């Protein structure tokens, strides 16, 4: 995924930045620079929009990618608006 595509999928949270790796509009996988324990809510804003996102964390594990160390967070979206869901799934379709 290019740097521009990663930037478009960035979620800005109070804990730090996270990037959407994959989503089906209901469930999601994020790459984050911080851990988030299972059961915790992860709240943020999709960069470049006013869409508020909340993810209920199912799992979190340490990973290492070409960009460096981080965490893979899996979970499901909570209270995701229809517009945000369409935007995220359209972006996911374009990046594959």
Image (cartoon, helix red, strand yellow):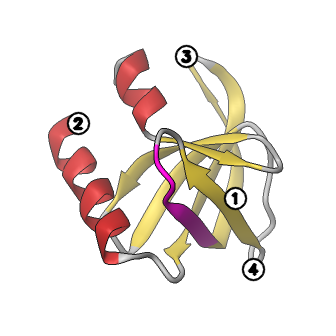
Q: Circles 1 and 2: CB distance less than 8 Å?
A: no
Q: First in sequence: mark 4 or mark 3?
A: 4
Which badge, 1 or 2, is on the more N-terminal residue? 1
Q: Looking at the figure, which quarter contains the N terminus?
A: top left
Q: CA distance from mark 4 to mark 3?
A: 28 Å
The reply to whether residue 16 is in sight is yes
Residue pointed to by mark 2: 95
* Tag in front: 4 or 3: 4
CA–CA distance in space, label 3 to label 2: 18 Å
Looking at the image, which residue is at 42% across and 71% down?
Answer: 27
Q: CA separation, marks 1 and 4?
A: 10 Å
Q: Secondary structure at mark 1?
A: strand
Q: Could you tell me how far apart the alpha carbons at marks 1 and 3 are, in whole angstroms? A: 19 Å
Q: Which residue is mark 3?
A: 66
Q: Specify few, some or many for label 1: CA neighbours under 10 Å numbering under 14, 14-19, or 20 or more.
A: many
Q: Position of residue 41 (x, y in %)?
A: 73, 73
User: What residue does disc 4 label?
Assistant: 39
């Amino acid at each position: 995924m290019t740097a521009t595509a990663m930037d478009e999928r960035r979620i800005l949270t109070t804990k730090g930045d996270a990037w959407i790796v994959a989503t089906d509009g209901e469930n999601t996988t994020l790459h984050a620079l911080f851990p988030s324990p299972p059961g915790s809510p992860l709240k943020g804003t999709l960069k470049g929009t006013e869409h508020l996102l909340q993810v209920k964390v199912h799992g979190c594990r340490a990973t290492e990618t070409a960009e460096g160390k981080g965490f893979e967070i899996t979970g499901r979206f909570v209270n995701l608006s229809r517009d945000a869901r369409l935007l995220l799934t359209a972006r996911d379709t374009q990046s594959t």
